[in-house]
Amino acid sequence: MRVAMAKNRGVLIAIEGIDGAGKSTQSVLLKRALEQRGYEVVLLKEPTNGVWGSKVRRLAQLGRHVSPEEELELFLRDREENAKQHIIPALESGRVVIMDRYYPSSMAYQGALGIDPQLIRERSERVAPVPDLVVVLDVPPEVGVSRILKRGERPNHFEEEEYLRAVRDVFRRIVEEGMGVLVDGTLSPQRVHARILELAMPLVEDC
Ligand code: TYD
């Protein structure tokens, strides 16, 4: 069962990829470009700053390993809360919602830990709306890690290179199986942006 939504809804776009793929930069560029064209845009991020999102981030910083199943539960609770409080109301009022990470991240990150990605998808779709467009920014893990280090951040346990390699593989598989579009994240930010805008415009023009 999927979450119930009013018929005349806005557009939901998820920007995805491994850490350091450029999601946050691209989400902001997309928001700005759509606003310049007169659309009302809400940019949201998962994990959120709510109770569950903060908990998962704190665990990551402490390097404390919980089981993949427990980790998934936290992300799902965070998502359910975000959907109820922010995503669904924004869509119902006709806005464009850009997600800087959404449930494809759970499929890839917790999928890479051995949980079936399709099961994660089904569970997410019970609590959160299906996106109209998923963009997966694809970069090799060494590029992701070097961008994280350049930001002056220390990689947390989600960001180790071998793990990110497995996460990237799941993202690529998800796209091969029909969810979303792969965009080469090693291109210049402007070129990546142009490609995302090209993918988004037909959807927002339609809404
Ligand atoms: P990140 O986008 O890096 O958030 P912040 O910059 O606020 O720390 O997300 C933190 C980590 O959470 C990231 O490495 C990916 C991971 N993650 C999952 O494992 N599953 C999920 O469902 C989501 C949304 C994120």
Image (tube, rainbow, N blue to C red):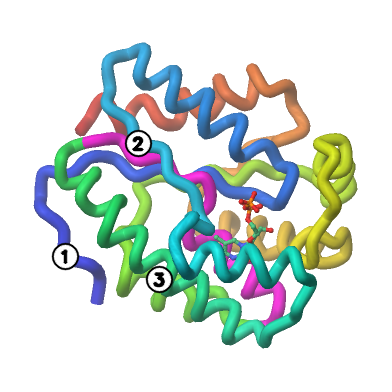
- Percent position of residue 151, x then y: 81, 36
Q: Nearer the viewer, residue 56 or 167?
A: 56
Q: Using residue 103 as the reference point, say whether residue 70 is left or right of it.
A: right
Q: Which residues are magenta?
A: 95-114
> What kind of element bears circle 1?
loop
What amino acid is labelled 3 in the image? Answer: Ser
**Amino acid tagged 1:** Ala
Q: Residue 149 vs residue 118: left or right?
A: right
Closest to the observer: 46 or 107? 46
The residue under label 1 is 4
| Residue 178, image x, y percentages | 49, 57
Whether label 3 lies within 8 Å of ligand 1 gets the answer no
- Which quadrant does ligand 1 occupy? bottom right
Disc on the earlier residue, 2 or 3: 2
Distance between the alpha carbons at the discs numbered 1 and 3: 13 Å
Quadrant (top left/top right/bottom left/bottom right) for the C terminus: top left
